[in-house]
């Protein structure tokens, strides 16, 4: 899973903590410092909002879920986190 964030954003920090609390392995990318990553995020999500979470299948690389913004219920449901904890 990839978590797109910007420094100092409360919702980005809350999304990161949620993933950590559930023991999710994720890569955090700071889009404020990486224009290419910001463009990639926008192409995949259709938005330039953070936090943005994008899950991909480990084998195929196919996108398995996208959540933009901090919505704990949507994050848990989209990425099936209830079964993790």
Image (cartoon, helix red, strand yellow):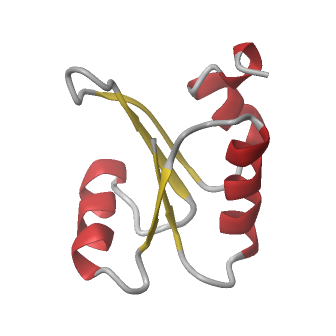
Depth order, front residue of 46/24: 24
Residue located at (41% from left, 69% from top): 48
Q: Is residue 1 above or below residue 61?
A: below
Residue located at (29% from left, 49% from top): 44
Depth order, front residue of 22/6: 22
Q: Is residue 78 above or below residue 22?
A: above
Q: How many marks?
A: 0
Q: Is residue 76 above or below residue 9?
A: above
Residue located at (69% from left, 24% from top): 81
Residue 57, image x and y in percent?
Answer: 33, 24
Q: Is residue 23 left or right of residue 46?
A: right
Residue 39, image x and y in percent?
Answer: 24, 69
Residue 79, image x and y in percent?
Answer: 57, 26
Residue located at (76% from left, 73% from top): 10
Quadrant location, the N terminus? top left
The answer to which quarter of the image holds residue 11 is bottom right
Q: Is residue 25 above or below residue 60?
A: below
Quadrant location, the C terminus? top right
The answer to which quarter of the image holds residue 16 is bottom right
């Amino acid at each position: 899973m990839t978590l797109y964030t910007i420094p100092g954003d409360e919702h980005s920090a809350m999304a990161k903590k949620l993933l950590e609390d559930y023991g999710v392995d994720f890569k955090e990318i700071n889009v404020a410092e990486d224009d290419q990553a910001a463009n990639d995020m926008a192409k995949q999500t259709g938005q330039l909002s953070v936090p943005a979470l994008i899950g991909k299948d480990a084998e195929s690389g196919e996108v398995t879920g996208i959540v933009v913004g901090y919505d704990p219920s949507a994050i848990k449901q989209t990425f099936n986190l209830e079964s993790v904890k």
